[in-house]
Image (tube, rainbow, N blue to C red):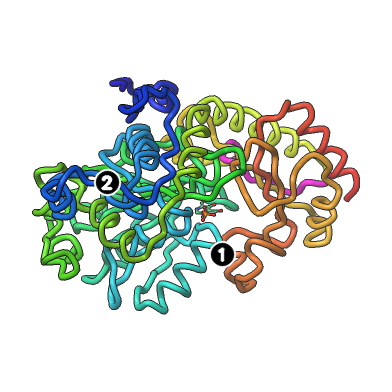
Amino acid sequence: MTNSNNPETIVLHAGYRTDPATGAVAVPIYQTTSFQFQDTGHASRLFALQELGNIYTRIMNPTQDALEQRIAALDGGVAALAVSSGQAASAMAIQNLAWAGDNVVSSTDLYGGTWNLFSNTLRQQGIEVRFVDPSDPENFRRATDDRTRAYYAETLPNPKLHVFPIKEVADIGRPLGIPLIMDNTAAPILCRPFDHGAAINVYSLTKYIGGHGTSIGGMIVDSGAFDWEAVPERQPALNQPDESYHGAVWTEAVKPLGPIAYIIRARVILLRDLGSAVAPQNAFQFIQGLETLPLRMREHCRNAAAVAEYLGKHGKVTKVIHPGNQSGEERRRADTYLKGGLGGLVGFELGGGKEAGQAFIEALKMFYHVANIGDARSLAIHPASTTHSQLSAEEQLATGVSDGYVRLSIGIEHIDDIIADLDQALAAV
Ligand code: PLP
């Protein structure tokens, strides 16, 4: 265990020291579906949440638990819930508060999959997501009404790479009883949204935290700092009796366990009922990735800054999208919220539009052409014809995707090899 506040130490030591049964130093993969109770009293205490412990791997497992504790410590939160994908984390983070007839106010600057979830699937379930332009934080207040249950945004959303005004929007929501949920997938280590007032973080572990392109997973992290009881009528899911758990009022029921009403409800209601559990084997892969995350983030950021500089000088590139190229309020937000680097993502536009974008992708030799970000390897994609192709032309432009836009996720290869591959591919356009 560690009391350190340094991410390099937390990722190696928080939440787990050795296996109590064997002394194993690496976190064991507890590949088991269920756990034997000590006796009938123990079993009923676990089910009644009088004691926390392992029952069944859909709800909780020691390998998942080590991962959850480590990420909660990294983010400065109190508890976390690992799930089967980043999409499951985003969906459950909202479903844990909002029901049919309720609404959520979200930034327009979102990953395409989240955009689809919000504008189609959640809407079909009766949850309205109201999209607002985050450049003016007051837009969140303007879109709020009595049925608004949460605000939602991404820290470093691609393709625009405009850092979100976390404190500004968290400060609007807090007196109204509305928590800010931040998708921090693109900026782990670089940003700690809880330090700026966010209530909940979500992650796709699939990206930087896993880092090696082997596993799909997600995480919801509870800051423990949001007062769910301050405006009780705002959060009925946590303040009214829950019929599916013997009428438990979550804010009351968990008081002896700590400020974990939100994350406990997500675990014992949503994970129980929807079943999006992460496999212990995948949880282990994420623990492995996490151990080197601070080192990798440093290299991703350093290489991405060098790529942005190189592209800025290239004659065929009409625009480079990277926080380092921003000015004014956008740059202020990047400098306020990102520490130790400006992220590993770089976008650029080619004058030749869609054809040029696709020709560039075809010509790459070392970069992988994949629908992913945050891998140790460098990755590239042409969003208009792939990740954002299900959006209308107007929606594409609203999210910052022009026809000639190319997204790069810069890896940790040697910078000379990264630039050499970009250089030869640009020559082919
Ligand atoms: N959030 C962001 C910012 C993402 O980039 C992604 C995936 O690309 C997701 C969420 C969804 O994560 P997953 O693919 O693990 O479901």
**SS at mark 2?**
loop
Residue type at tag 2: Gln
Could you say which is closer to the camera, residue 329 or residue 46? 46
Q: Is residue 118 left or right of residue 265?
A: right
Q: Gap between marks 2 and 1, in whole Å?
A: 53 Å
User: Residue 168 appears at what percent x and percent y?
Assistant: 32, 48
Q: Is residue 100 left or right of residue 67?
A: left
Q: Residue at x 15, y 57 (%)?
A: 250
Location of mark 1 (residue): 398
Part of the protein shown in magenta: 316-325
Location of mark 2 (residue): 36
Residue type at tag 1: Ala
Q: Residue at x 17, y 50 (%)?
A: 43
Check disc 1: other Cα within 10 Å, few if <14, some if 14-19, many if 20+: some
Q: Which mark is residue 295?
A: none
Check disc 2: other Cα within 10 Å, few if <14, some if 14-19, many if 20+: few
- Mark 2 residue's CB less than 8 Å from ligand 1: no
- Location of residue 5 (image quadrant): top left
Q: Is residue 374 above or below residue 70?
A: below
User: Residue 9 appears at what percent x and percent y?
Assistant: 40, 21
Q: Is residue 120 above or below residue 239?
A: below
- Location of residue 325 (image quadrant): top right
Q: How many marks?
A: 2
User: Residue 372 appears at what percent x and percent y?
Assistant: 63, 50
